[in-house]
Image (cartoon, helix red, strand yellow):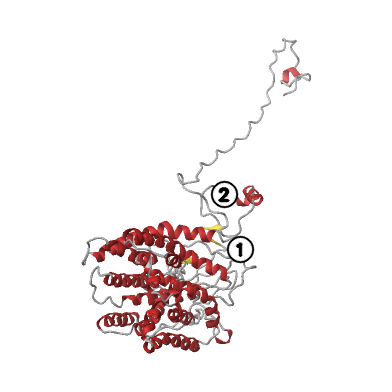
Amino acid sequence: MTGTAPAPGAPPAAPPAPAGPAPAAPDGAATLLPVLWSLNGLRAVGALLVMLYHINSWNLQVVRGSSAGFTGVGLFFVLSGFVLTWTARPGTTVGTFYRRRLARILPNHVVTWLLGLAIAVVLLEQVLDPTTALVGLLLLQAWSPDAQLVFAVNGVTWSLSCEIAFYVAFPLLLWGLRRLRPRTRTAVAVGALAVPPLVGVLWPATIPLLFHLPPARLPEFVLGMVTAMAVQEGWRPRVPAPVLLGLLAVGILGAAAVTVHPTVLTAALAVVFAPLAARCAWGDIHGGNRWARHPAVVVAGALSFSFYLLHELVIKMVLVTPLRGPGTIPLVLVVSAALAFGLYRGVEIPVRARLLAGSRQPRPSLAELGAAAHSPAERRPRHSRPRSAAWSFPVPATAGPAVALAVAAPPAGAAALGSAVGHGAGGSSVGLAAPGSAVGPTAPGPAAPGPDTGPAATSATLGGFGTPAAPGGSTAPAAPAASIPPVPSADDARWAGPPSPGAPGWRPPAAPRTPPPVPVRVRPWAPPPPPGPVSSPGSAASTGAAPADDAPLL
């Protein structure tokens, strides 16, 4: 490879930066994570595969090659472990982690559970045992060997039951996996992934139970965690993403044409899902994958969780009608997408924001509210941001030059939907700017509201939670300095300017105060003196000087 020689006298070029993403910034410094838009797109593809599988299994329309579409749930589990490990930050308490996860899942689950209960009782005229309905509401059904209980009310929520079990184990898994060598972690993940197929081959009667039992699906989640740690340490798959997508297509379509053991197929596709997620993440880190930042893909990824929870309920509603045939596929797709948009905008975003906002800090007393209202530092116009916020991102008091990764700018139209985090995995948006988050936020996310931290004094922190430690206590290398955006300090956080006329909270500027008029000293009027004798030259009368007894000026 050739290159031009540096000019004489020019400073030496900076050494190349290591390949791996930057490690987490120290406490008190803001950390910006790249938004993994492509993982949102993969999540949408997984939801579409599951929808086609259910349309075929409910006999609405025969969809060739969709009999293996249930493997899309395995993609959800791999992405869930990847995203949670990717967005884990040092100092996050266990209570804060669980609160964020429940705020991500429960609002949509409760609404769709009520809708599924109404459809089952009113439209399908089913008789449900109260215990069965309650177990489904509490997301405990995946632990039952009874298939009627597992898939009652809203059948797809068995995967949420598995996700809840994964969330419970995640802090301990993260703590343990961080302390293993990379090769040891990989061996543990691959070995665990081989256990369910082995049990299914030796005891075929356990295959239905292995499909939904949380311990049997945990290896896919662990594989996603190990893959995220490997990417943080600089590992990049050598196989291109198009080749991996081709392998997935061959595996899914081939399994529909040839009878394949379900547990073996699930494990085999999970081995392809993991490097595909890693390859897509690297593309997002380096600013590639422009297809994933297209507004249509961003919207599909944001709605994938709501769509997944609603699509089978829509299929059940179509079952009571005489509609059958190819037209049911676009019908289920459009109706499910419309309902998912309403659920996302009307329930998921506002309820999650309220749940997280109410837990960020204790409620102030009346005395504190009164003192804050009369404090000059906290006064601000109505409907405006506090002076301690730079736009919508709160700046910590100790913020300074922070080690951060380059963040891909959100595409046009993506801000209208906010950030979304995966099928039960949330995380962040994936960014969305770490919003909290923010995926972004995750974004920040966006979106995401600012980070909601729990009381660190009373909650135990996860040991090294989110710290990508390598053997020997070393951390992952830092990102190039050119990709580090500046982070404003607390002194630089200001309101971006006065609101425009007509905006909420705008008031016309006060008229300038005119000073009082200066009093004018006026000589009082007096009658003219009577004429006197003619004076000689040089006298006072001839020179025009004022007489000695003249009245003083006022």
Observer-nearest of 102 and 510: 102
Helix, strand or loop under label 1? loop
Q: Give the mark, 2 or 1, whose residue is nearer the N terminus.
A: 2
Task: Give the residue pinned by disc 1.
Answer: 397
Observer-nearest of 134 and 403: 134
Relative to residue 100, is residue 86 depicted above or below? below
Q: Tell me if 99 is positioned left or right of 249 in this view.
A: right
Spot occupied by residue 484 in the image (x, y as percentages of width and height): 50, 71
Q: Is residue 415 visible?
A: no
Task: Give the residue pinned by disc 2.
Answer: 380
Residue 349: quadrant of the picture: bottom left
Which residue of the protein is positioned furthest toward the left in this rendering?
A: 325
Tally of numbered discs: 2
Query: Label 1 amino acid?
Result: Ala
Q: Tell me if 135 is positioned left or right of 26 in this view.
A: left
Helix, strand or loop under label 2? loop
Query: Label 2 amino acid?
Result: Arg
Spot occupied by residue 401 in the image (x, y as percentages of width and height): 57, 69
Spot occupied by residue 225 in the image (x, y as percentages of width and height): 47, 79
Q: Is residue 230 visible?
A: yes
Q: Tell me if 182 is positioned left or right of 240 in this view.
A: right
Mark 2 in CB contact with mark 1 (< 8 angstroms): no
Relative to residue 492, is residue 32 depicted above or below? below
In whole angstroms, how far apart are the C-alphas of marks 2 and 1?
20 Å
